[in-house]
Image (cartoon, rainbow, N blue to C red):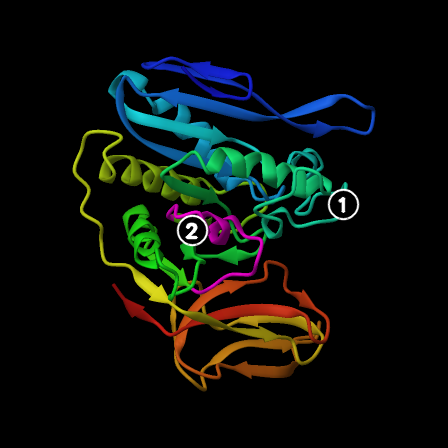
Amino acid sequence: MTSLGTAQAAPGEIDTGRLPAGETRDGGEFGLPVAVINGAQDGRTLYLQAASDGDELNGVGVVQRVVPRLDPAELSGTVLVVGVVNYHAFQVAQHRNPIDDTKMNRTYPGDAEGTSSERIAATTFDVAKRADLILDLHQGSTSRMIDEVRVRCGSRHRIHDDCLELAKVFGSGYVLDQKGPGGQLARAGPDEGIPTIDPELGGCVGWCERSIECGVQGVFNVLRYYGFLEGEVSPETQTRATGFDQYGAPRGGLVRFEKDLGEEVSAGETLFTVRDVFGTVKADVVADGNGLFWRSRRLPQVATGEYVCSVATGIGTY
């Protein structure tokens, strides 16, 4: 019998339930939605979580489509799922936990006696540590962004190559291989010896079916490659970036992009212009170096110094 909160599944069974993670302001207990898919055959354990940022819903869309397609009779090993991590932010469609104004994915491995976010992080990390592989599903918040996978442990980490292999197997087409900020699950997991990746499934308001399908395919690639399900997977060559150049608005106005997501960028090429409401160009912003147009703001209006776009650098393949 495998348990996760109130969900319990014997070999060959699936169950859903709630994982207690604290109390709300009215004193009632709340729980995170969880699922256990316990394979009929022995094997590894995969941990899958979504919505550690409350407005990043594409990962929830992936969970909603993957779980019904998993037949425990055909599964070797176990899949543990937390469908919504940032409970409070999800309820109000915000990025950060409104209880403590914290970005959840900066609080791992968490603290069972800490803030609201630290307690949720500690609760979910206790589950993640039971796994052999970790997938932490994200998206580029409400910005426009390509579908990518992030390896955040840093190139000198002892299991960096294992994380990079997992990213290649997931197969979004693009990988950012750059050490992330402290407190990310994709850094805490590898420190426990568990290959962990952070798929960033596009960026949108609400959710995007194309990016969700990319995530669904990625999860099944992982399940097949690592022996949870039958089927052959031959990882395809991925475009790999090792950094970002970020660009802000030198003047206020309305942005007009000259590049689209995924397009190559050469040093000196125009990335975007800033114009006034009558179309007069106020600023012409060019690329500092070569790279790929990776991410951009969604709304055209900007104030001086406001973020506009990112160009991925250190481009190669593997």
Q: Which residue is labeled 1 in the image?
A: 100
Give the Cα distance between marks 1 and 2. 27 Å
Give SS at disc 2: helix
On the image, the x and y values in percent for residue 178 come to 44, 65
Q: Name the front one of labels 1 and 2.
A: 2
Q: Amino acid at mark 2?
A: Pro
Tally of numbered discs: 2
Q: Is 1 placed above or below 102 here?
A: above
On the image, the x and y values in percent for residue 88 come to 70, 35
Q: Amino acid at mark 1?
A: Asp
**Left or right of residue 147, residue 252 in this image:** right
On the rendered image, what quadrant is the C terminus found in? bottom left
On the image, the x and y values in percent for residue 295 come to 50, 63
Q: Which residue is labeled 2 in the image?
A: 190
Q: Is residue 240 magenta?
A: no
Q: Which residues are magenta?
A: 178-195
Q: Nearer the viewer, residue 134 or 205?
A: 134
Residue lying at 41% horizontally and 57% vertically, measured from the top left: 151
On the image, the x and y values in percent for residue 243 come to 45, 71
Residue lying at 28% horizontally and 59% vertically, measured from the top left: 238
**Left or right of residue 114, residue 155 in this image:** left
Residue 156 location, quadrant = bottom left
Q: Is residue 181 magenta?
A: yes
